[in-house]
Image (cartoon, grey):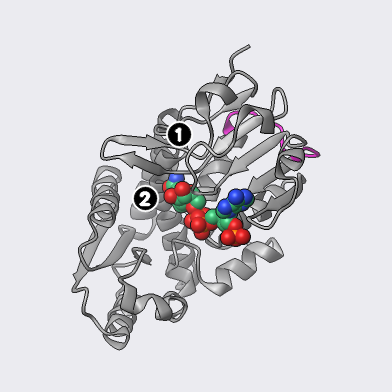
Amino acid sequence: MAARILMGKEFAQKFKAEAQKGAASIREKYGVTPGLAVAIVGDDPASQVYVRNKHKTCEELGIFSQVISLPATITPDDLMAQIDALNADKRIHGLLVQLPLPQHLRAYEGKILERIDPLKDVDGFHPVNVGRLSLGKPGLVPCTPLGCIKMLELAGIEIDGKRAVIIGRSNIVGKPMAKLLLARNATVTICHSHTQNLAAITREADILVAAVGRPEFVTADMVKPNATVIDVGINRLAPKKLVGDVDFAAVQEVAGAITPVPGGVGLLTVAMLMQNVVAAAKMQLQQTQ
Ligand code: NDP
């Protein structure tokens, strides 16, 4: 039987509506509009599309948005001075630096991200927020895995006691996804490029998350019948052809539920960013009371 298709749009609309409601209630309670600043360095076309989309979504949901476009030649010190100014700006509750950075700044990426005030770190990449997630304490959580876990919950897919396997151990997707599943009592395995007998491990998964960055890497023989398959991958094969990390056509015949690419979890990331801006604003305003 063909799998249930988990359409990102449907979930993203609900998450955005929650963010809009949250922003309105902050305005009502504190007289303050939650605000997001996105710093973009250089002119990478894909990054520009992502940043425009964030800005547009803020406007739709009643969130103040500021895009700070910086030249590709900016020095690490000047970029950090920009972050300091945004950390101090009362209109800004969420702050992120769009990745990837130009080549000459990549060696400073960790330092740059650590310069962001953890209370404004709406990407959830600051070590303070990474630590809070590891400890199971409230904090700001990376948007893509947060969207995946909230989608599973909203879709009514059981996590407690289930076997979850994640392919990929990045700080942006794989590791935080593992922590979120563990916090909900899944038994979690993280796989990576050194994992042996990968297919034997993935076949044990009730919930399989693919965050590899390789087109159609997960094939039907790697999936347990009736499993839930979350495809985080975005691979551009041609200007207008995107595919995920999962061989969707074949795997949907085996899986119980599956997210498509495009139209799957990619749509959730911006919605969760909006929720993080609202959550960050709430934390900051509560602290000042
Ligand atoms: P990374 O490149 O940082 O990580 C990829 C992971 O896959 C690594 O841990 C790597 O292992 C592992 N891997 C690579 N090859 C294999 C293999 N043959 N077998 C098992 N594991 C392997 O990618 P990201 O986590 O940043 O992103 C993953 C995908 O998700 C990409 O397609 C990206 O575009 C997409 N993405 C989508 C987002 C969205 O909004 N929907 C947001 C972020 C990412 P090792 O650590 O050993 O190298």
**Mark 1 is on which residue type?**
Gly
**Residue 161 belongs to magenta span:** yes
**Residue 176, percent from left and from top:** 60, 57
- For the view shown, which residue lies furthest in the bottom direction? 77
Three-letter code for the amino acid on which mark 2 is drawn:
Ala
User: Vertical placement of 83 versus 169: above or below?
Assistant: below
Q: Residue 38's image quarter? A: bottom left
Front-most of residues 118 and 35: 118
Does residue 140 sit above or below 16 in this rendering? below
Q: Give residue 287's position: percent from left, percent from top.
A: 49, 71
Measuring from the top left, give residue 233's x and y in whole percent.
Answer: 48, 44
Relative side of 238 to 206, left or right = left
- The residue lying toward the viewer, choosing from 215 and 36, is 215
Ligand 1 neighbours mark 1 (CB distance < 8 Å): yes
The residue under label 1 is 264
Q: Are marks 2 and 1 in contact (CB under 8 Å)?
A: no
Q: Residue at x 32, y 79 (%)?
A: 104
Taking the image as drawn, is residue 173 in sight?
no
The dominant secondary structure in magenta is loop
Residue 23, label in figure: 2
How many numbered callouts?
2
User: Which quarter of the rendered picture does the N terminus lie within?
Assistant: top right
- As helix, strand or loop, the secondary structure at mark 1 comes to loop
Height in image: 133 above or below 84?
above
In what element is the residue under mark 2? Answer: helix
The residue at the point 39 percent across, 33 percent down is: 262
Residue drawn where x is 50% and y is 63% of the image: 124
The span shown in magenta is 154-163
Q: Is any atom of residue 268 visible in this view?
A: yes
